[in-house]
Amino acid sequence: MSITVDSLLSGLIGALVGSGLAVVYQHVSLIMQRRSEVIFLAVDYLDELNYLSRHIQQYKENKYKENREAFSQERYVELCDKTDYLLTSSRVHARSVDLR
């Protein structure tokens, strides 16, 4: 059984193509992983913002419509501060820039 130059060249080309495809696959999968991390972070951010907004609304409804307190004044201030922080922070944007 003799090895010819054609079979060696064919094997070399196959190895180069396979290596190139592996690098491309790793690059694409890394990009997709980073995007999914940013999406999960954005969903978490919006979920927390929605949660705080609903609690503030419940407090306001109980306070002004029914004249009874569901939360203390400290709890209301805490919810407002957390909501202000979320609305003015750029955590998702900063994370997406870091991942590039």
Image: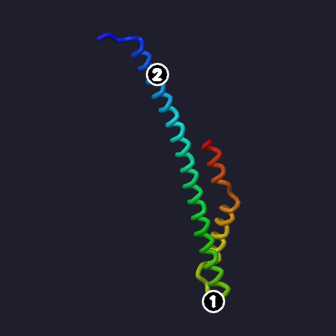
Q: Work out which quarter of the rendered image holds the N terminus and state it.
A: top left
Q: Are marks 2 and 1 in contact (CB under 8 Å)?
A: no
Quarter of the image holding residue 56?
A: bottom right
Which residue is labeled 1 in the image? 66
Sequence-wise, which precedes: disc 2 or disc 1? 2
What secondary structure is marked by label 2? helix
Q: Nearer the viewer, residue 31 or 40?
A: 31
Q: Which residue is drawn at the image coordinates 60% and 74% (left, top)?
A: 54
Q: Which residue is drawn at the image coordinates 46% and 21% (left, top)?
A: 13
Q: CA distance from mark 2 to mark 1?
A: 78 Å
Q: Is residue 54 above or below residue 87?
A: below
Q: Is residue 65 left or right of residue 5?
A: right
Which residue is labeled 2 in the image? 13
Q: Nearer the viewer, residue 100 or 25?
A: 25
Quarter of the image holding residue 83?
A: bottom right
What mark, if any, has residue 47 been given in the picture?
none
Query: Label 1 amino acid?
Result: Glu
Q: Position of residue 71 (x, y in %)?
A: 60, 79
Q: Residues within 10 Å of mark 2 (few under 14, many from 20)?
A: few
What secondary structure is marked by label 1? loop
Single out the mark in the foreground, 2 or 1. Answer: 2
Q: Position of residue 84 (x, y in %)?
A: 69, 65
Q: Nearer the viewer, residue 53 or 31?
A: 31
Query: Label 2 amino acid?
Result: Ile
- In the displayed orientation, state which residue is furthest to the right: 88
Q: Position of residue 100 (x, y in %)?
A: 62, 42
Q: Residues within 10 Å of mark 1 (few under 14, many from 20)?
A: few
Q: Is residue 23 above or below residue 36?
A: above
Q: Which residue is drawn at the image coordinates 65% and 45% (left, top)?
A: 97
Q: Is residue 15 above or below residue 56?
A: above
